[in-house]
Amino acid sequence: MRTLAPKATGATLQELHEELGIPIGSLHRVLATLQEQEFVTRSPTNRRYFLGPVARQLSEQSTGHSALLVTPHPAIVTAAEASGETVFLTELIGDRAVCVALREGRHPLRLFVRIGQEMPWNAAASARALLAHLPGPVAHRLLDARPLSAFTDDTPTTLDTVNEHLALVRARGYDVCDDELDRGVWAVAAPAFTSTGSVAASVTLAAAGGRMRDPGKRAEAVRTVLTAARALSDELGFAGDWPDTVPDPEPPGTPATRTPAPADAPDSGPSARPKKGTPR
């Protein structure tokens, strides 16, 4: 953990082996044990190891300072600088949606997000943008595993309402959270995909709701997040079809113009079949 602590971009198993001189088999077993206890996490996208939420929480408790922010992808940085708002990356780690990198906004009033923070499946746009594009059985298992807690009066807390919302996310290609997780916070999230068409992560822009009441500003935030998510997908080799997304400044729940995919669709993301020459 001491070796991983200063590495903002994490480290691969091979890099840790070369630096520590520990046999790969032994090192892998140690890391697996640390993962089980959440002292270490492993990104499913790039297979790099990072300090986990437990290690970061212990660090914060002992020092009184926030954990160092993991260096985000340039697309995240660009989105944050263009919007002035906090933008972060969320991945599926185990059975949780976890913030793995972020760039804070420049406004005095910012959304407080930490590396390693878990995002609730039913309430956070960052989590729902992932959940909507997971295979149906996996999504159902994740929703069944934990209570659908209410964080505000607007949080969806039944399987029916969550599944209806996930269908809307698939139809328009992004998710919006307005007062559903934190009162006075507005967020938009879009998924990023791998070369096989599976969802890899979500990109989320979060802001104080009072700054996002203008429909034009909301639409611009949607475009910013979609651009960042597609840049990440391009880098991961995704060449499939994207939903016909049109920034919708209306609150979540506005009827989608396209027919939603079934909530239990086993393959609910964009087409995994690459199309050579297809503009992205």
Image (tube, rainbow, N blue to C red):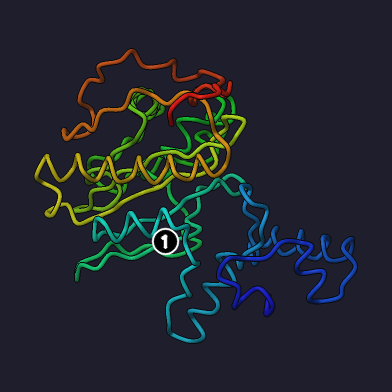
Q: Nearer the viewer, residue 231 or 129?
A: 231
In the rendered image, the residue lying farthest to the top is 259
Q: Disc 1 designates what residue?
A: 102
In x, y percent, where is residue 223?
27, 40
In x, y percent, where is residue 150?
32, 44
Rendered residue at 43%/85% (across/down)? 64
Left or right of residue 8: residue 250: left
In the rendered image, the residue lying farthest to the left is 214
In x, y percent, where is residue 49?
66, 62
Q: Quadrant of the C terminus?
A: top left
Label 1 SS: strand
211, above or below 122, in the image: below
263, above or below 28, in the image: above
In x, y percent, where is residue 143?
50, 35
Rendered residue at 72%/64% (across/down)? 34
In the rendered image, the residue lying farthest to the front is 277
Snapshot quadrant of residue 254: top left
